[in-house]
Image (spheres, helix red, strand yellow):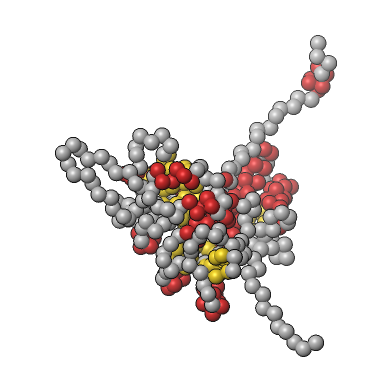
Amino acid sequence: MSNTLIFDYAVSIDEAQAATRVDYSFLNRCLVMVKGKYVVPPPEGEAKATSKKSTKASEESAITDPSLYKVVPIYDSTSIANYTDNTEVPFLMKGGLESINLLILATEVDPVDEDVISFDPTDYFTLCFSADMTIEEAQAINFADFDGSKVYATADKALAEELNQTETAFIENSDSYQGAYEEVGHFLSRTYFRNCQYHVLSGDNETSTIWTVGEADDLFNKRISFFLNGSDGPTLGFFGNGGHAITKRYVDRLIHLEVQEAITAYIQTNEPNNTAVQRVNIEEAAAAVITKYEGYPYFYLDPDADNYINIMKSNELYYVNGAAKLKDAEPIWRAQIEVTEA
């Protein structure tokens, strides 16, 4: 007979339902849109179809249908050539990514290739375009469920400034994506989100660079991403997104999700009622996320700012209200030093 009979009789313990966990790996997952090299074989007796250069949806519309595209996961840079003639894509892996995802029109991918998967925009947070399409064609790509960062490269400074209002735009004299790809690869492959100040590209990266402080000042003030002509190679002079530091979009998304997860997990596990004590408990669960990201090893939020989240009673049935204020920690890129006589 079990010697725990009395305990089991006196105190019945049930395991609480495990709280739902969120997979945040999509924040580090990268898509690159390229032209596929597969061409549908023509019927016998007909001329072989010629391949068009642009990677463009078949219909002009405000929203792009994701079902028109397929994704090819890449784990070895040597396999990229099996799917596209684009020779710049390997720089994403040279930057540090162990895997990338080619985004190709479904008509440009072999339909019997078992490595090809369906495209779900919510599985990714970074979409890089390529020289396989014009900037105008890239701008026309708009997946309704994709709310991440889009990366462009252009020689047109005015266009780069326009793109940079909402996305990431690298200035590149030859419209090449080599520098952008390697820097994105470096950024996404790191353990923590960092701003990569003055990161030096690999020796075989031929991205264009800025040679004068005056031009660098202009690009920096416009928050356009660019590389300086460094003695060790192309050196990152600024890396941004939407007029902010590159980290902001990623950090904001991460923290918002973790706050949502913390509140959901508390409700799911504790099944609270709308009382003052329970509202405080929910608030503390959410505030723990803020405290976590203010300190080591993240430093995503500015600890000198008044970061907070408040949970309050709502007049609406089954709801609580909330208010939050969060300030990202801003990176240091440059210093201005005034020298006076001692």
Image quarter hosting the N terminus: top right
The x, y position of residue 4, in whole percent, is: 82, 18
Residue occupying image coordinates x 17% and y 41% = 46
Placement of 84 over or under 140, stated as above or below: above
Task: Pick whichever, 217 or 278, lies toward us.
Answer: 217
Q: How many marks?
A: 0
Image quarter hosting the C terminus: bottom right
- In this rendering, would 112 be left or right of 187? left
Residue occupying image coordinates x 25% and y 49% = 50
Placement of 327 over or under 274, stated as above or below: below
Placement of 47 over or under 194, stated as above or below: above
Residue 330 is drawn in which quadrant? Answer: bottom right
- In this rendering, would 131 be left or right of 12? left
The x, y position of residue 214, in whole percent, is: 54, 80
Residue 291 is drawn in which quadrant? Answer: bottom right
Residue occupying image coordinates x 62% and y 45% = 261
The x, y position of residue 293, in whole percent, is: 69, 55
The x, y position of residue 165, in whole percent, is: 48, 67
**Residue 314 visible, this angle:** no
**Residue 83 visible, this angle:** yes
Task: Pick whichever, 291 or 231, lies toward us.
Answer: 231
- In this rendering, would 154 be left or right of 18? left
- In this rendering, would 53 be left or right of 129? left
Residue occupying image coordinates x 64% and y 50% = 191
* Residue at the far bottom in the pictured view: 341
